[in-house]
Every structure is written in structure tokens, then in C-alpha cells.
Image (cartoon, rainbow, N blue to C red):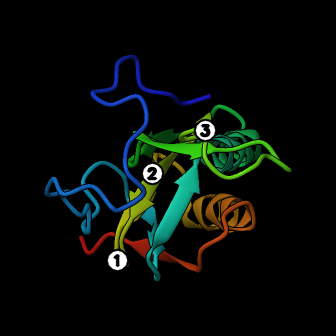
């Protein structure tokens, strides 16, 4: 799965990070992209499942770029544990995505193949998405 090699804080606060995150809102690498139309989190497992569905459909044709990375740690306490006793252990990592961000880009394939691959990937994600095309 996608996890950072090194993190500054092992157990971060639950609030959103204060650092300014660039919103990747334009197609940079490929001709087609998957754009998120609402704010939310994408877990490392969801990103990997979407990536596998794109690669599986394209069958080694074209190229795929992943524009997000899960670098925010989420902790979780075991069920039926009493109050107190500190913060829970690290559970998984998420990527914080904003409305209008592009999460996947595809290039080197026809429009039909790219749109079908991105449509299949959107089923794996918990957020509403839209397929966009480069203005060239």
C-alpha cells in the first residue's frame, strides 16, 4: 500500500493539516483525468484499488499518473476500551483531497479506453468524480 517512508508526527491531531496544500486542478501529464467534485479523504487502499482497476482495463497500454499521496495518519482505538488511556494506535493513512482536485491522469490511449478505465476507477472511490479531457 501507499505509505510515507518517514512522518514528522506519529500520531497527528484530528484537525486538518495547517500546511498549505497545492490543489492539482489542471491536467499536467496526460490527456484525460479523474476530477473530484467534493471534499474528503481517500485511503491508501481506495487509491490502490482504483489504480489496479485502471491498469487492469488498459492492459499495459498508455500511462497512468497518480496525483495524490496518502500522507496523513489516522489513529483508531480498539472497540470496547474505556475512556482514558491515551490516543489510539496508527490505523491507516489518507490523502486529503479538495473539491476540484485531479487524482488520476491517463495518457497514450484512445478516449474510449481512457473514459472506461476512469469510470471503473470512480466506482472504487467514496467521493463523487467527473472525467475531464485536456483542452488542446
Residue at position x 41%, y 42% in the image? 69
The 10 Å Cα crowd at callout 3, few under 14, some 14 to 19, many 20 or more, is: few
> Residue 86 is drawn in which quadrant?
top right
Decide which of tag 2 and tag 1 comes sooner along the chain. 2
Q: Is residue 110 above or below residue 55?
A: below
Dot 2 corresponds to which residue? 95
SS at badge 2: strand
Where on the picture, by quarter, is residue 120? bottom right
The circle on residue 85 is 3
Q: Is mark 1 on a helix, strand or loop?
A: loop
**What residue sits right under mark 1 in the picture?**
100
Between marks 3 and 2 in the image, the one whose residue lies nearer the viewer: 3
Q: Residue 101: x percent and y percent?
A: 35, 68
Q: How crowded is mark 2: few (under 14 residues within 10 Å), some or many (20 or more)?
A: some
> Going by the image, does 84 lie left or right of 69?
right
Q: In which quarter of the image is the N terminus?
A: top right
Image depth: mark 2 or mark 1 in front: 2
Q: Which of 8 and 111 is in front in this view?
A: 8
Q: Do the residues labelled 3 and 2 touch (CB within 8 Å)?
A: no
Q: Viewed as shown, does residue 128 lie left or right of 29? A: right
Amino acid at each position: 500500500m501507499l505509505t510515507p517512508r518517514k512522518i514528522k508526527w506519529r500520531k497527528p491531531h484530528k484537525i486538518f493539516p495547517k500546511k498549505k496544500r497545492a490543489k492539482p486542478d489542471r491536467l499536467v501529464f496526460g490527456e484525460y483525468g479523474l476530477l473530484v467534485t467534493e471534499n474528503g479523504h481517500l485511503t491508501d487502499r481506495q487509491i490502490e484499488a482504483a489504480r489496479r482497476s485502471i491498469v487492469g482495463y488498459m492492459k499495459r497500454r498508455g500511462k497512468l499518473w497518480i496525483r495524490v499521496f496518502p500522507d496523513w495518519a489516522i489513529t483508531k482505538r480498539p472497540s470496547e476500551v474505556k475512556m482514558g488511556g491515551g490516543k489510539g494506535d496508527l490505523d491507516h493513512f489518507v490523502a486529503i483531497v479538495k473539491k476540484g482536485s485531479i487524482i488520476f491522469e491517463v495518457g497514450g490511449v484512445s478516449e474510449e479506453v481512457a473514459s472506461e478505465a476512469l469510470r471503473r476507477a470512480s466506482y472504487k472511490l467514496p467521493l463523487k468524480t467527473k472525467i475531464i479531457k485536456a483542452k488542446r
